[in-house]
Image: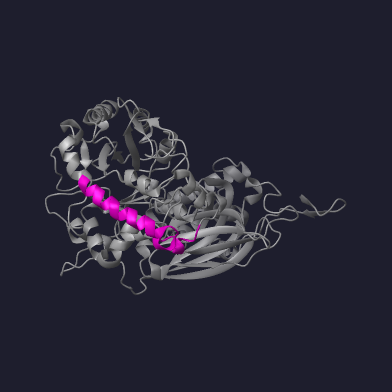
């Protein structure tokens, strides 16, 4: 029973009640229990195969395990005492995120293709604890990222003030530095705590005028990582190794120092920081549909910055060849840089050489307008890294789908923030067991008889249809204080569901709001036609309706449509940073036609 004070003298009392199983759950129980009051393990097996899509060979063991766990948890019944479920037991199983999750938590993609065949969970300025201008640099966010499965770590390396050691910091800002060796040791200690697949360290190298420090970096790398460090046998790889070949290995990649020019053009950091609205003020962040670079402020100046970066990258690459110590150069497994010439030359696929290309978010958008097919063809063999534009001082992020639709493997994000863009990134990399490598779909890798490849701008027919039914929600009263959402009454929840992916597929829909209820029941169904289901993400947000202000946040998650398990599933909700809430969850049904 919860009490809410209306005024000094009066209170309203509300009871948190456990909602009945939805009609579909009752119907399924009645059907598979054959009209009885209990469902046996064999009857549950039939339900798992026919409704939940489980493989016949696995279903017997799964059903036995579910019955045993439910009975022990709910009734403390020892094994073999009773071996059947009541309707309430059956509902409890379906509403358990541990026993009945929406996606598989195992690595199941082919991990033997070259690295260029995978989307790679990648961070940008991985060492920053907050905004891009004034926050501290530390190894802590690097460790956090690795523990979440991030496989691409970026470190900006600079000489210290006395030019006898190497620091990691965001150059020409007032961010406080951290020693490179500390970051490297933390990567060594935590790289494979979540995933066994390779970690790519992107070194943003600002040591070109101090080759002795580059030699020192080479020494740090070899001594810190030892046999973990992948050193190519030749200076020029014809094809990247596979994630499976590179298990528990560290890979070094270098790219040009874009931040140096960005800092010069941007000017005074403190003034710019005041001009940019901090995304922390809005827990939701912007809708992905308006996150494209050309729809934000300061675009003209940032575009000019991008052009200068491109020029500087070319100069840097030739300068690098002159000054790099031989040992340092030998450690670079994924070389970066842009060939001189126009965009056609930049995207040229060389038969005997692979490389990495870096483009800013607006650089990719501009290139994709006229050369989208060339980008897709380039990424079939080479690696494309996309990074946030220079004016994202508050560590906000951009729409990742643009990069993924063009085959970009390393769509680099500021992992220390939150908001809808980051939720999409987290959703993509829940795929394949959360190992940080997601196999690119065949549509991005196939080459037709006339050398044609996937065209991201083309409109395709509907390939699949996703049906989603939102039954109910529960658990908020365990995760939040009684007055967290409303001082005077229980919350008014509603759920938004939709698709992020190809432009033709993107849409958001919502349920009706349920007033004054901690355990809302909606029973509403939505249909989503998908033209590119391989790259679609199911977006789920729970809002608490607020008449006078912006809706309160009550949980979110994003799930890859290609990984969804059919049937009735429990959907665990996450907080605004992507951490799983302890109890809040939804009961939903998925059907893919």
483, 564: nearer the viewer: 483
- Position of 40 relative to 295 (above/below): above
| Rendered location of residue 517, percent (x, y) | 69, 58
Question: Which segment did they paint magenta?
Answer: 286-315
Q: Residue at x 30, y 24 (%)?
A: 164
Residue 297 in the figure: left or right of residue 224: right
Residue 446 in the figure: left or right of residue 404: left
Q: Residue at x 58, y 58 (%)?
A: 542
Rendered-image quadrant of the C terminus: bottom left
| Magenta-colored stretch includes residue 38 | no
How would you classify the magenta stretch by its main secondary structure? Answer: helix
- Number of numbered callouts drawn: 0
Q: Residue at x 39, y 68 (%)?
A: 503
Q: Is residue 561 visible?
A: yes
489, 31: nearer the viewer: 489
| Rendered location of residue 576, percent (x, y) | 53, 50
| Rendered location of residue 353, percent (x, y) | 14, 49
| Rendered location of residue 273, percent (x, y) | 49, 47
Residue 391 in the figure: left or right of residue 586: left
Q: Is residue 52 visible?
A: no
347, 33: nearer the viewer: 347
């Amino acid at each position: 029973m919860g009490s809410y004070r209306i005024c000094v003298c009066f209170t309203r009392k509300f009871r948190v009640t456990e909602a009945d199983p939805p009609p579909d759950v009752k119907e399924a129980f009645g059907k598979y229990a054959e009209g009885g009051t209990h469902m046996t393990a064999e009857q549950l097996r039939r339900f798992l195969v026919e409704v939940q899509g489980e493989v016949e060979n696995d279903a017997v063991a799964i059903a036995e395990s579910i019955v045993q766990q439910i009975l022990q948890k709910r009734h403390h019944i020892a094994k073999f005492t009773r071996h059947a479920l009541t309707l309430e037991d059956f509902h409890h199983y379906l509403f358990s995120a541990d026993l009945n999750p929406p996606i598989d938590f195992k690595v199941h993609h082919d991990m033997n293709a070259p690295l260029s065949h995978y989307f790679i969970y990648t961070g940008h300025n991985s060492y920053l604890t907050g905004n891009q201008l004034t926050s501290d640099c530390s190894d802590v966010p690097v460790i956090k990222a690795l523990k979440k499965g991030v496989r691409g770590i970026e470190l900006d390396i600079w000489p210290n003030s006395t030019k006898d050691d190497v620091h990691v910091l965001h150059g020409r800002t007032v961010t406080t530095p951290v020693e490179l060796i500390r970051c490297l040791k933390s990567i060594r200690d935590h790289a494979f705590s979540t995933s066994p697949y390779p970690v790519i360290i992107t070194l943003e190298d600002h040591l070109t005028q101090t080759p002795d420090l580059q030699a020192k970096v080479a020494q740090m790398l070899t001594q810190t990582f030892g046999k973990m460090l992948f050193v190519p046998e030749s200076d020029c790889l014809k094809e990247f190794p596979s994630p499976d070949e590179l298990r528990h290995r560290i890979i070094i990649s270098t790219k040009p120092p874009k931040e140096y020019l960005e800092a010069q053009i941007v000017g005074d950091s403190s003034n710019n920081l005041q001009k940019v609205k901090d995304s922390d003020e809005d827990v939701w962040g912007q809708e992905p549909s308006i996150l494209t670079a050309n729809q934000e402020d300061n675009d003209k100046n940032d575009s000019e910055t991008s052009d200068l970066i491109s020029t500087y990258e070319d100069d840097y690459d030739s300068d690098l060849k002159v000054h790099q110590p031989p040992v340092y150069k030998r450690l670079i497994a994924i070389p970066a840089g842009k060939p001189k010439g126009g965009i056609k030359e930049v995207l040229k696929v060389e038969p005997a050489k692979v490389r990495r290309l870096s483009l800013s978010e607006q650089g990719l958008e501009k290139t994709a307008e006229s050369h989208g097919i060339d980008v897709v063809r380039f990424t079939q063999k080479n690696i494309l890294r996309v990074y946030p534009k220079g004016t994202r001082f508050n560590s906000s992020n951009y729409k990742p789908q643009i990069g993924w639709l063009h085959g970009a493997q390393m769509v680099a994000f500021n992992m220390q923030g939150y908001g809808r863009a980051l939720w999409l990134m987290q959703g993509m990399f829940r795929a394949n067991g959360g190992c940080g490598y997601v196999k690119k779909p065949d549509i991005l890798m196939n080459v037709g008889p006339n050398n044609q490849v996937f065209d991201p701008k083309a409109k395709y027919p509907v390939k699949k249809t996703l049906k989603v039914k939102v039954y109910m929600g529960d658990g908020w009263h365990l995760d939040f204080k009684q007055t967290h959402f409303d001082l005077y009454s229980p919350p008014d929840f509603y759920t938004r569901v939709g698709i992020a992916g190809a432009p033709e597929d993107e849409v958001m829909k919502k349920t009706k709001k349920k007033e004054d209820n901690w355990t809302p029941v909606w029973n509403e169904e939505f249909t989503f036609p998908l033209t590119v289901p391989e790259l679609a993400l199911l977006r789920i947000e729970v809002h608490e309706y607020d008449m006078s202000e912006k809706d309160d946040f009550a949980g979110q998650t994003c799930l890859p449509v290609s990984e969804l398990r059919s049937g009735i599933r429990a959907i665990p909700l996450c907080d605004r940073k992507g951490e799983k809430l302890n109890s809040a969850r939804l009961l939903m049904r998925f059907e893919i036609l």
